[in-house]
Image (spheres, grey):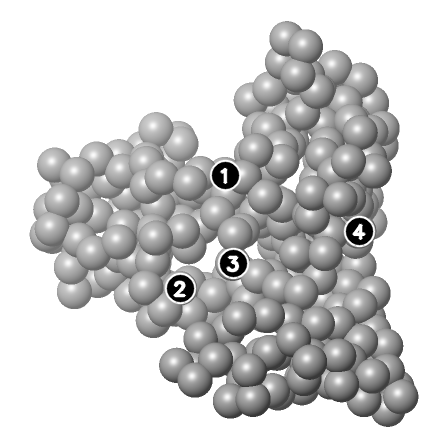
Amino acid sequence: MSKLAIDVKGLRKKFGSHVVLNGIDISVPVGTVYALLGPNGAGKTTLIHILSTLVAPDEGSVKVAGYDVVSEKNKVKQSISLTGQFAAVDEMLTSEENLQMICRLSGLTIAESRTRTDELLKHFDLTAAAKKLVKTYSGGMRRRLDLAISLVVSRPVLFLDEPTTGLDTISRRALWEIILQLKAQGITIFLTTQYLEEADQLADRIAVINGGHVVASGTANDLKSKLGGEVIELHNSNEELIGTVSTTGTIHDIRLSLNELALKYPQETRVSIRKPSLDDVFLLLTSKKLEESLS
């Protein structure tokens, strides 16, 4: 495999007259975590489907694990694992039965299937529930099982499409630990997420997609630096956030902003100043104004 696990140049895809992806360029080094952010309908899942050979691109060059997703489709399939947005497990089987079935379908012998199943149950903390029907599992347990199933056969590239959607905070953080463990094993992980904290915590690099384009990419700190300065937050007497203002960070600009806000908001408004977050960057990059400028 080349030094790039994923190499996308000039990717375009449309459905009917609707252009979903319009000139996407993405490079993902081997052994890293890459997060794709974007509003609903931005094309994140379509991009995952193209990278995993489920959908063909209209234009551009798309390589995964060094193989072209069109001309070398089978080699790409042999190099990737995919976990979609919804748990793809049989609820009427136990986790042990689900895993053993997928192992057998993947070509492992009965003995190999038992060994691999035990390994995965232990790694994903499912051994205690191995013989319970999946329909009795919590959302977090189902997602861990779904991820375990996708890793029955070790592959160098793993696609995770919104892997923690719907999970509570504890389950989400537990899954983060598993993802970081997989990265430590040298697996390249490409994930889409609607949780900005998730991208901030996990990703070596982040891309923001909007209006069919990659509107920004870099490390979390790179993206945060686009706003520069400080962010002023305003809360009412009920501690509800009622507004935010970005500043350049200079004392003069902060004072000027505070003076202007003092004229607009009630005296009891509480003001706090903080560093920019990934949420601030995301809102800036996916604003209606930006969409209009790209159309």
Residue 45 is situated, as x and y percent measured from the top left of the image, at 56, 34
What is the CA distance from the residue labelled 4 to the residue labelled 3? 17 Å
Tag 1: amino acid: Leu
Left or right of 181 in this view: 47: right
Q: Which of the two residues, 10 or 269, is positioned nearer the viewer here?
A: 269
Tag 2: amino acid: Arg
Mark yes or no: residue 92 visible. Answer: yes
What is the CA distance from the residue labelled 4 to the residue labelled 2? 26 Å
Report the mark closest to the observer, 1 or 2. Answer: 2
Q: Earlier in the sequence, mark 4 or mark 2?
A: 2
Residue that numbered label 3 is attached to: 195
Quarter of image, res 246: bottom right
Tag 3: amino acid: Tyr
Q: Earlier in the sequence, mark 4 or mark 3?
A: 3
Q: Earlier in the sequence, mark 2 or mark 3?
A: 2
Tag 4: amino acid: Ala
Report the mark closest to the observer, 3 or 1. Answer: 3
Q: Residue at x 61, y 24 (%)?
A: 53
Height in image: 290 above or below 10? below
Q: Residue at x 73, y 52 (%)?
A: 285
Report the mark closest to the observer, 4 or 2. Answer: 4
Height in image: 273 above or below 148? below
Residue 40 is situated, as x and y percent measured from the top left of the image, at 54, 39
Mark yes or no: residue 81 visible. Answer: no
User: Is disc 3 in contact with disc 1, using a CB cutoff of under 8 Å?
Assistant: no
Residue that numbered label 1 is attached to: 82
Residue that numbered label 4 is attached to: 216
Residue 100 is situated, as x and y percent measured from the top left of the image, at 26, 41
What is the CA distance from the residue labelled 1 to the residue labelled 2? 18 Å
Dot 2 falls on a residue whose secondary structure is helix
